[in-house]
Amino acid sequence: MPIDQRPLAVFLMGPTASGKTALACALSDRFPVDLISVDSALVYRSLDIGSAKPDAATLARYPHRLIDIRDPAAPYSAADFRGDAVTAMQDITAKGRVPLLVGGTGLYFRALQQGLSQLPEADQAIRERLTAEAAVEGWPSLHVRLRQLDPVAAERIGPNDAQRIQRALEVIELTGRPLSEQQQGGSGERFPWRVLKLALVPTDRAPLHARIAQRFDAMLKDGFLDEVRALRARGDLHADLPAIRAVGYRQAWEYLDGQMDAAEWRDRGIFATRQLAKRQITWLRSELDARVIDPERPDSQRIATDAMALFVGN
């Protein structure tokens, strides 16, 4: 069998609040890796507290590429990420180092490694009709429809994720095939890097849920609502933008719109974050070639370090 000569890359994946950033920083102390963020919220500037973005001191010591690269008024897609990530990986590899991609946005990881299938272009008439239906029925009702037509896509799309529900239903109407089925096709090209996948998947979710609640309360104390107020004050942002639909931000926006009281807003923010973690764990379990590590184990960092040593050396 010929030796695989492709350069190395590492994917460090896990649900929100599972300790990915801390582990990535620890691994970068030991191995010749440069970090690339794989997070659909961290790409946006000014989304700092509610996105749990690493603080300035952490980023100064452990630079992450693809953080703070887009204004929140400008949408950022999986295709955008793939192009930016490949460019960053090529640069890191050319310097004789190993790209370590860390984050929890499964769609980005999949688009990067498998490529993007050729989906149909947007159809404005269909989009306007779906938007009108959602105005009457609500996006959760259209999510129920999506679950009947494409349960795989519905599992990873939240019931209030208007843009992705709309796109999934649009693709089904235009092609007669589920979006999830078409996304599996990818580009068919071999990924240029040989990848070690490390997946932080807790066996017991109770500690993860507790950390999510604790972190959310810490965000509130750190001024999360003031951050969202500042975003609203710009005047050019609205609730349908991908940045504002990020978990936590959407609920904060609705609270500031007067749609709920403070107690409900906190509960809904925590619940939405737990649901995000659930979807992320479901996706991770489909990554059959990943080395699964329980982040609650006291020796989880050693397990990751041993796997890295075998893959990267040192």
Image: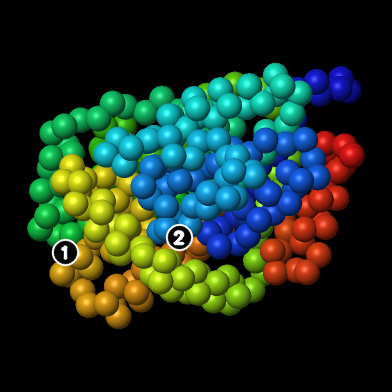
Query: At x 31% / y 32%, what residue is drawn?
Result: 175
Residue 257 numbered tag: 1
Horizontal side of residue 197 vs 104, given as left or right: right
Instruction: Point out residue 88 in the picture as x, y percentages from the top left corner.
Output: 58, 27
Above or below residue 189? Residue 245 is below
Horizontally, is 31 left or right of 1 in the view? left
Secondary structure state at the residue bearing disc 2:
helix
In this figure, what is the number of numbered marks?
2
User: Can the viewer see residue 253 in this picture?
Assistant: yes
Identify the residue at horizontal 12%, vertical 55% (top origin): 135
Assign a secondary structure to mark 1: loop
Q: Can residue 130 be seen?
A: no
C-alpha gap between disc 2 and disc 1: 23 Å
Residue 15 in the image: above or below residue 241: below
How busy is the neighbourhood of tag 1: few (under 14 within 10 Å), some, or many (20 plus)? few
Residue 239 screen position, x and y as percent: 22, 51
Say the numbered circle drawn on residue 221: none
Look at label 2 and name its amino acid.
Leu
Q: Quadrant of the C terminus?
A: top right
Identified by mark 1, the residue type is Asp
